Amino acid sequence: MRPFRLIGIVFLWLASASLALLPAQFVQHRRKAFQVAPGSGTNPGTSNLEAWWNFEANGNDSSGNSRTLSNADLALSYTTGLVGNAADSTAGNRYYLFRSDEAWMTPGGAFSIGAWVKFSDGQSGAVQGIIGQFGGAGNRAYYMRATSVGSIGFVVSSDGTATTSVASSVTATNGATGWYFVVGVFVPSTSLTIYVGTGSSITTDTNTTSIPAGIHPSSSVFNVGTSENTSANTLIGQTDSAFFYSKALTADDVTWLFNGGAGRAFADL
């Protein structure tokens, strides 16, 4: 056998042995970042779309399902966002939107939630809820949020208390930020995936460890711009083009919605 062939075989054997020694969570937690050109991807359309909120001047639902969100404080304003206007909670900490519990909020299978967000401070020292139905202990279902140090994550609960999560490798910056496109996708017993798009690229992080078979049927309200329906967890900044699909969006779907960082309006679907 020629020496260079022997060296190649030994190298491949060592690489395989090293992979086998990796802890399971490192093998199962996958990360990927990719550049996105405007117009690429696949339009997810309106199939299984439960709600889409443009936030042009109110919390009206554009999907035709009449799932309008109410303002927790009338001082919530609507100012220029990424796609038309956006809900603006920059001025105070009680400005968020909500809707009382309904059956569509807890689908029996896969689902996806998402929104464009722009933080006044990505590392505010407090949790900033983005979108979801996440009450106190015993009443948790799912939500996306940024932690006090800017870690953007997607969290689900199967029993209302214990949680399973995936954290993005993208961290919201300290101080004012640009726009982030955040999408969480839950596939029962299979995966939790979070997509975070910023600039012209999307980063994908997936957790496949101990994923629950279903989501707790929480009776908490559904929130955009906070969690636990409380001002303590308010997102201080802007929220644009939020949505809820009762299906698992694909990477191509998310790519199309991101649109190279330009976003999409409901009319584009």
Image: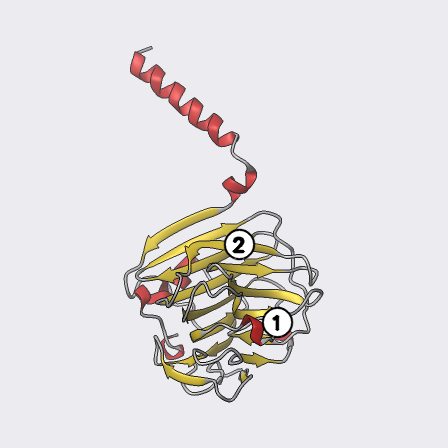
The outermost residue toward the left is 37
Q: Amino acid at mark 2?
A: Val
Residue 228 is labelled as 1
Image spot of residue 38 (x, y percent): 28, 65
Where on the picture, by quarter, is residue 162? bottom right
200 on left or right of 141: left
Quadrant in the rendering for residue 24: top right
**Tag on residue 11?**
none
Task: Report which quarter residue 177 is drawn in.
Answer: bottom left
Q: In the displayed structure, would residue 14 be above or below residue 212?
A: above
- Amino acid at pointer 1: Glu
x then y, percent, for residue 1? 33, 10
Q: Is residue 198 left or right of residue 108?
A: left
Q: Residue at x 52, y 70 (%)?
A: 131
Question: How far across and how far down the image is residue 203, in percent?
Answer: 39, 55
What residue is at 34 percent from the left and 17 percent from the top? 7
Residue located beneath label 2 in the image:
166
